[in-house]
Image (cartoon, grey):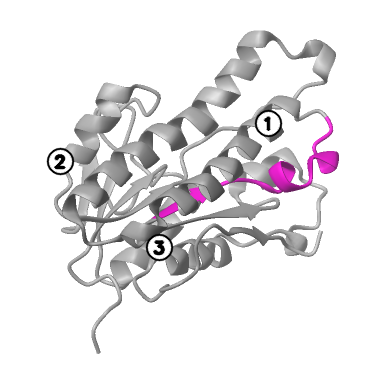
């Protein structure tokens, strides 16, 4: 039976991170060729798929730099989907949050999504073959009351959610479907180390989050667009 992504090229920003790697695994299983930008010369040593025949690592790509982003996307043939997982997290009480802290969150979370979405849309519009864009927002974007101490982070992820809905409307005539997921706490090693007393069983597994993302990016998804899907655990 044919695989959903057979012969299709997919960009995955943040593809060497915990969630990104889980997404890459599923995409490879479905036949995709994955294009993964990294900020250094090569993928980190713990990225197990760097040598896979259908993984293309692009080194020294600063996702906050428009020229670097455009150059990365110009090297992808027949782009089908662009999945934007790269981002960051920081928190502090508002009286201790500096202007530079706010700018940093907006750059790493919102600006990267804007630049990558713009480059992906340009490629898809030129090809006139449709496509899929999937962003990663956060629960704090949809429920900012749960974001105490996370004003800058919540604002940056809310921008991602708003861009998703606006882009979906703008690109729908070209059959480019744009969606996002908004996870609560993901079950990663970093989060477990940061919150060792938490009930990990209530968190969202990487596999479950990755499945939601890959479904939205798939050609099997024929109609869903403009959705910011809440993927919460039991917390």
Q: Secondary structure at mark 1?
A: helix
Q: Is residue 119 left or right of residue 46?
A: left
Say which label, 3 or 1, has the lower sequence index. 1
The residue lying at 71 percent from left, 58 percent from top is 203
Crowd around label 1: few <14 · some 14–19 · many ≥20 (10 Å)? many
The residue indicated by pointer 1 is 155
The residue indicated by pointer 2 is 75
Residue 12's spot in the image, x, y percent? 35, 48
Crowd around label 2: few <14 · some 14–19 · many ≥20 (10 Å)? few
The residue lying at 56 percent from left, 61 percent from top is 209
Residue 110's spot in the image, x, y percent? 53, 32
Q: Which mark is residue 137?
A: none
153 is higher (above) or lower (below) than 30: above
Crowd around label 3: few <14 · some 14–19 · many ≥20 (10 Å)? many
Residue 104's spot in the image, x, y percent? 56, 19
Q: Is residue 206 magenta?
A: no
Instruction: Report the Cα–Cα distance between label 3 and label 1.
Output: 25 Å
Instruction: Report the Cα–Cα distance between label 3 and label 2.
Output: 20 Å
Residue 124's spot in the image, x, y percent? 25, 51
Name the residue furthest bottom.
1
In the rendered view of the protein, which quadrant contains the C terminus?
Answer: bottom right
Q: Is residue 128 left or right of residue 114?
A: left
Which stretch is magenta? Answer: 133-148
Q: Which mark is residue 217?
A: 3
Foreground of the two, 99 or 21: 99
Res 51 visible: no
The residue lying at 23 percent from left, 40 percent from top is 73
Foreground of the two, 167 or 105: 167
In the rendered view of the protein, which quadrant contains the N terminus?
Answer: bottom left
């Amino acid at each position: 039976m044919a695989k959903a992504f057979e012969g299709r090229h997919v960009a995955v920003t943040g593809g060497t991170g915990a969630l990104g790697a889980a997404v890459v695994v599923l995409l490879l299983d479905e036949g995709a060729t994955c294009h993964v930008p990294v900020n250094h010369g090569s993928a980190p040593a713990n990225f197990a798929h760097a040598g896979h025949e259908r993984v293309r690592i692009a080194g020294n790509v600063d996702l906050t730099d428009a020229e670097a982003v455009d150059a990365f996307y110009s090297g992808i043939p027949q782009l089908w989907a662009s999945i934007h997982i790269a981002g960051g997290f920081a928190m502090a009480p508002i009286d201790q949050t500096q202007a530079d802290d706010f700018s940093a969150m907006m750059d790493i979370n919102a600006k990267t999504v804007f630049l990558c979405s713009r480059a992906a849309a340009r490629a898809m519009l030129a090809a006139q073959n449709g496509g899929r864009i999937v962003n990663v927002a956060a629960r704090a974007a949809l429920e900012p009351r749960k974001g105490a101490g996370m004003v800058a982070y919540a604002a940056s992820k809310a921008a991602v959610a708003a861009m998703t809905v606006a882009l979906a409307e703008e690109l729908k005539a070209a059959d480019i479907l744009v969606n996002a997921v908004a996870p609560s706490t993901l079950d990663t090693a970093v989060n477990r180390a940061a919150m060792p007393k938490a009930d990990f069983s209530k968190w969202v597994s990487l596999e479950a989050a990755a499945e939601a993302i890959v479904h939205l990016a798939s050609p099997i998804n024929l109609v869903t667009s403009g959705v910011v899907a809440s993927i919460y655990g039991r917390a």
